[in-house]
Image (tube, rainbow, N blue to C red):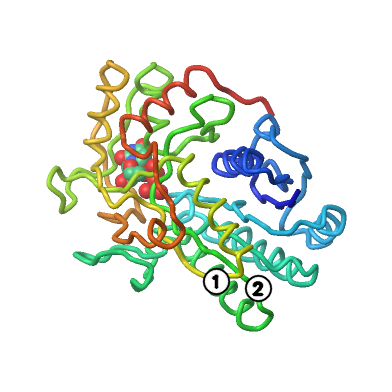
Amino acid sequence: MATVLVTGGAGYIGSHACKALAQAGYTPVTFDNLSTGWQDAVRFGPFEQGDLLDRACIDEVLARHRPDAIMHFAAFSQVGESMQNPGKYWRNNVWGSQNLIEAAVDAGCMDFVFSSTCATYGDQDNVVLDENSEQHPMNSYGASKRAIEDILKDFGAAYGLNHVIFRYFNVAGADPDAEVGEFHHPETHLIPLMLDAIDGKRDALTIFGTDYDTPDGTCIRDYVHVCDLVDAHVLGLKWLEGGKGSKVFNLGTGSGFSVREVVNHSAAVTNQKVPIVEGDRRPGDCTRLVSGSTRAETELGWQPKRSDLPTMIADAWRWHRLGHYEK
Ligand code: UDP
């Protein structure tokens, strides 16, 4: 049975990836420093607590588990925080990833799946965002991810490190069995914050900016279900196993929804009012991020199954009411 080292396996997307890998017959070994992840979320394979800034620790874990591939999710991922504390993003995301990539090459683990982001594209009016679009990140989070993409490209050219890069649009929803789900502390993402506002855990959802150049004045995003997203990662792994070489894939549905539309869908799914407050724009936010590519569908055979907004919100709501983690 093939072993996959999953960095960030105790986090939101990484824990869903571990479940998908286990279901596909792989052994997912979680490598996580628990800075934002939860030990309770590690349910589908072994756990190694460690930090990507500690190269010796990575080497030791790679030597012990001898993984066939790496899926790299571990990163700080908050746009707003990255604008206030860019050093944290460059140090952890970029330097930590370089450590991991160098360790992978030295260990001869040459299949690498990387979690990148549509934030690497930045704001590009009227441009269809496909994998060949220019990348002009507007925040340090996106810039850090683009830098890691560059490292992978260089290590691919120099050492033959095979890599699949996934540029995610907005990930939402939760495992329909509610075994794992989204639980950030503090929470900054739209849908979980809205669910908190709906059930009174916070007073209201603040809409960040109502004066954008969009039909209702709020930002537009392309939401993709976390289970569909991690299914694509398993397909990406098989792509690398099949010797098909390095490739970049957008992961989005191609449909954009404004913040107000997400609010309205959430009210309908939960059958409750969403308390909202209209606030200022959040620094670093792009007006519109929607995928314009079907490459993942045509080349990987990816078929999103749960990425319609009502299903994503219903799955998130189920997890919100049933699931929780303890450190
Ligand atoms: N958003 C909002 N209020 C919040 C959190 C987010 O209006 O409390 C908006 C945010 O400005 C963006 C969208 O919701 O337009 C998605 O933000 P999120 O932080 O979930 O993901 P991001 O797009 O930053 O990756």
Question: Which residue does the numbered mark 1 point to in the structure image?
Answer: 246
Extreme bottom residue here?
A: 158
Q: Is residue 143 left or right of residue 70?
A: left
**Alpha carbons under labels 2 and 1: distance apart:** 8 Å
Residue plotted at (70% across, 63% down): 100
205 and 244: which is toward the camera: 244
Residue contact at pointers 2 and 1, CB within 8 angstroms: yes
253 and 269: which is toward the camera: 253
Tell me which image quadrant ligand 1 sits in. top left
When asked about the image quadrant of residue 119, the answer is: bottom left
Question: Which residue does the numbered mark 2 point to in the structure image?
Answer: 161
Residue plotted at (61% across, 82% down): 157
When asked about the image quadrant of residue 172, the answer is: top left
Q: Taking 84 as reference, is 181 above or below it?
A: above
Label 2 Cα crowd, 10 Å radius (few <14 / some 14-19 / many 20+): many
Residue type highlighted by circle 1: Ser
Picture coordinates of residue 184, whole percent (x, y): 53, 35
42 and 230: which is toward the camera: 230
On residue 210, the disc is: none
Picture coordinates of residue 105, whole percent (x, y): 74, 71
Q: Which of the two labelled residues, at mark 2 and mark 1, occupies the earlier sequence position?
A: 2
